[in-house]
Each structure stands twice: as structure tokens, then as C-alpha cells.
Image: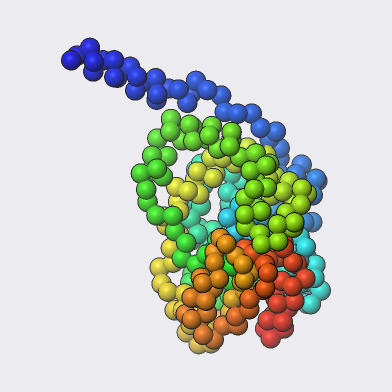
Amino acid sequence: MTRVVKRLLQVLLVVALLPFLIDLPAGAEARPEELLATGAAPIATVVTVEGRRTVVATAGRGSDPALILVHGFGGSTFGWRHVMESLAASGWNVVALDLPGFGLAEKGWDGSYDHASHAKFVLAVMDRMQINQAVLAGHSMGGNVVAWIAALAPERVRGLALIDAAIGASFGDSPATSALQASPLRRAARILIRSAFTEATFGELLRSAFAVKSAATPEMIRGYAAASRLPEWDAALLGVLRDGSRNALTQPIAEIVSRAGAPIPTLILWGADDSWVPLSAGESLRDALPAARYVVLPGLGHVPFEEDPEAFTQAMQEWLAALK
């Protein structure tokens, strides 16, 4: 019996040490500045906010009212490249940024990646840019982030655009995410992620989100995959999964929008053929927020601003016109 126990301990020791004996698959790691030079984001700059580096892109005049675009899971400033100038042309100071852990923002296991922390980071970017109040447009996961901003600082929100929004999204605690706290298992997970996530994988994920499959061009796929060329990108992805159980809003979205005084003007904008966050979720939001403007874009999927930038921009501009 003692011999069996000793043998079992030896096996467990090997399993624990194995991830440290295997090198992480090599990647063509780059700095954000290098990737910006290749067109991995719109005209953007690398800035440091609260000690963390990120990328901020702007279009329009700083004197115009601010419109801040907040990307979704796996997204970045790159995703807004086709709509920023046209939105700015209608009289808005358009700002897009990469949330910590995503795009060309600083990455690593030790960051805080829950949506409340992301919301506070966006507010810090607003402070740095001296933007007192803004219309906030959030896509998918970003919809939950902008809802958090409205909950934390309603006085700074001029309007909310919820684009195929994953409101209340929370991954929940699980043994798998809890196990990531153990360094050997986390390293093993990083090995698997680096091996599995190739440019082709990013292409498959993008096409699965689109109703217009042809919109996922090679140039677009390279832009979304650029994040995987930064150091520690895989560790940040695990950090996002680790912190996902804290994403849920602490009050109903209807209470957040119905702030003291005037309710927050809200747009609910959805691709009719969204297979990631289905139209039924948009309908539920419409029912919860009857005063909101509700627009469905026919034939489009989860990322309407990529699939049909003109239709997306028109829907946004029609709503924004009433907020100026």
C-alpha cells in the first residue's frame, strides 16, 4: 500500500511539474506601437491611464459632444475603423479605446478584468481626456460595461447605445476557473491556448458571429488577431475568465436607466440574425426599457458595424441627432 501511495505521489508530481518542463509555444510578440504601424487600429495612440497602457483612437473635434465606443469580448478599437469618421462627421467627438486585457491594451494575469473595473477604467480615460459627459455605445460585452458606467456615474452619461448587448453577462464560478489560481494548471492552459488560437481560429470565430460571412476579410481577421501578438495575451484571456463571475450588474438595467431626474436616453440596436446574442435578448431589453429606441438591422449578425457600416452608422446618427 505504501508503495502504491508513493507511486501515486510520483505521478502527481510529474503532472504538476510537466507544464514547467514544456516551453510556451513561441509567438511573434510585438509592441503596441509596432502593431499600430501595421494598421491594427484606426489612427490611435498608446497612452497610460492609472498606470496601465492602452490604445485610444479619436475622430472629430474635441469641442464636439463626446461619443465613446466600447468594444466587446475579443474586440478592440480596430472594430470601429469603418464608422468613426462618419459618426464624427455628424458633429461628435468620437473616442474608442481598448479595455484592459483586450486589443492592444496592456495584458497579464494580474490585471482586474471584471466589468466594474472596466467601467472605472473608461471613466479614468474620460478624466484623462477631460470629457465630463459622453454618449456611451457598448457592443456585446461592452454593453454590460457601459451599463456599469451608468450605474457607477449616471451624471457622466448623456446616452446609452446598447449594440447586440450582453447585458448582465457573467461567467459564474466554476471548478475550471477556480483551478486557474494554481500556477501549474494556469501554465498548462496557456500552452493549450497558444497552440489552439491561430489566425485561422480567429477567422472561424469572426465568421461564426457574422450573418454576412463575406464581410470577414483576411485584412479584418489579421486586425482582430493582432492582440495575440502581444506578450501575455493568453494570460490576460485567462484573467478575463477568472474575473467573469463578478460581471453581473448589481441592479436591473431598467433601474440604472431610470436615474433620478431625467431617464438616460437609450438606443437598443440589434442585428436581426445575431447568433451569439440572439434577437430575443434584444426584445427582452426592449420590454425592460419601453422608452428606449429599438432598431433591428435586417440580414445582419452580431457585429453590424463590420457587416454593414453604412446601415449601422445611419441607425446611430438618427438616434444621436436627438441628443445634441
The image shows residue 290 at horizontal and vertical percentages of 51, 85
Horizontal side of 94 relative to 257 (left or right) equals right
Which quarter of the rendering shows the N terminus? top left
Furthest residue to the top? 3
Q: How is the image coloured?
A: rainbow
Residue 62 visible in the displayed image: no
In the rendered image, the quadrant that contains the C terminus is bottom right
Q: Quadrant of residue 35?
A: top right
Q: Is residue 89 left or right of residue 119?
A: right
Q: Nearer the viewer, residue 320 or 307?
A: 307
Q: How many marks?
A: 0
Residue at 58% over, 55% down = 73
**Which residue is at a point 60% across and 65% down the rendered structure image?**
274
Q: Please tell me which residue is depicted at 67% across the width and 73% down the height of the picture.
A: 298
Q: Is residue 135 left or right of residue 11?
A: right
Residue sitting nearer the eye, 197 or 234: 197
Q: Is residue 82 above or below residue 268?
A: above
Residue 210 lies in what quarter of the image? bottom right
Q: Is residue 192 visible?
A: yes
At a point 58% along the width and 49% down the height, the residue shown is 101
